[in-house]
Amino acid sequence: MTVPRQSIHVESPTEWRNPRTTEIDRMSTLQILRTINSEDQLVPAAVAAALPQLGRAVDKATEALRTGHRVHYVGAGTSGRLATLDAAELAPTYNVPDDWFQVHHAGGTAALRVTAEGAEDDELAGAAEMRRDVRPGDFVLGLTASGRTPYVLGALAAAREIGATTALVSNNPDSIVPGVDLMIAVDTGPEAISGSTRMKAGTAQKILLTSFSTAVMVKMGRTYSNLMVSMRASNAKLRGRSLRILREATGSGPQECTAALMAAHGDLKVAMVHLLSGVDIRDAARALAEASGHVRRALGLLAAPVL
């Protein structure tokens, strides 16, 4: 059995003592909150610096999905919980197939609510999950504030050996992980409370995950303009949103849009292509299938004006 490769051990800045918050336990409530908020304001700039690397990860993940492969998130603790949340929200928002995004969290689902002591140190468990679930051509994104969580590093090493493309989000800019295809370092510095990586590090990872998955969805044609045209209208609120989106995108009236949605059996994209192009529902659905679900591409195939 191959032993997963370790990162070069460099203490993460998230563990350093923050000189700006040493008096936090003497502050008033409002001062505490303002101090934390001041630290939080450092996060967007740190994320912005990592966007070129994140962009490459988006392109690799999109390529994987377009060729019939999957995206995997791997994390422990806060990182794993944030990854689980991001993946869970993609289904209702973009109606993604259940197997597009897979999450591997140290300690399993039970660890989402209660800390699983020692699970993040089990590098062989991370590797075993990859050997069980990852296929060549998949994209695997690991997340760890320290840049050295054994469960995550073990998973990434095994995934790369299998033939997956690997990337690591880390809040330790000095961490070196041999063999990872893409390093996405987000230097958020020391936390307001030393080592509490659910603070700035967690906020940065949440922003990165949301940006990553949203960009992938846009490139996969799950939006039209900035509208969520692939969402699953599973309740009254979302059905009402579908109608509003269709009206905004096409300029048609409520009755016409309602009729189009009914004719399309609730498929917002089909109704949209139908109204924008003037073709019947069946031809709209056929054009979307040929365009892999991209509304703009389908309209191009039908030589319809793209708004």
Image (cartoon, rainbow, N blue to C red):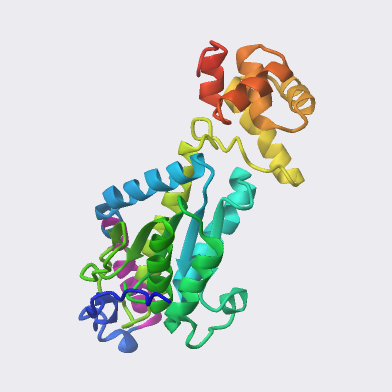
Decide: is 270 above or below 227: above
- 200 vs 296, left or right, is left
Residue 143 coordinates in the image, percent (x, y) = 40, 66
Is 42 magenta? The answer is yes
Residue at 54%, 15% (x, y): give it.
301
Decide: is 219 above or below 14: above
Q: Quadrant of residue 156?
A: bottom left
Residue at 31%, 62% (x, y): give it.
180
Residue 190 visible within the image? no
Please state, as top left, top right, bottom left or bottom right, where the N terminus lies in the image. bottom left
Residue 227 visible within the image? yes
Q: How many marks?
A: 0
Residue 119 coordinates in the image, percent (x, y) = 49, 83
- 114 vs 53, left or right, is right
Q: Quadrant of residue 281?
A: top right
Decide: is 288 above or below 133: above
Residue 128 coordinates in the image, percent (x, y) = 51, 73
The secondary structure that most of the magenta stretch takes on is helix
Is 49 magenta? The answer is no
Write the start and end of the magenta stretch as one range.
28-45
Outermost residue on the front side: it is 1
- 189 vs 208, left or right, is left
Q: As rendered, which of 103 and 145 lies closer to the eye?
A: 103
- 52 vs 288, left or right, is left
Residue 148 coordinates in the image, percent (x, y) = 32, 76
Q: As rendered, which of 94 and 149 lies closer to the eye?
A: 149
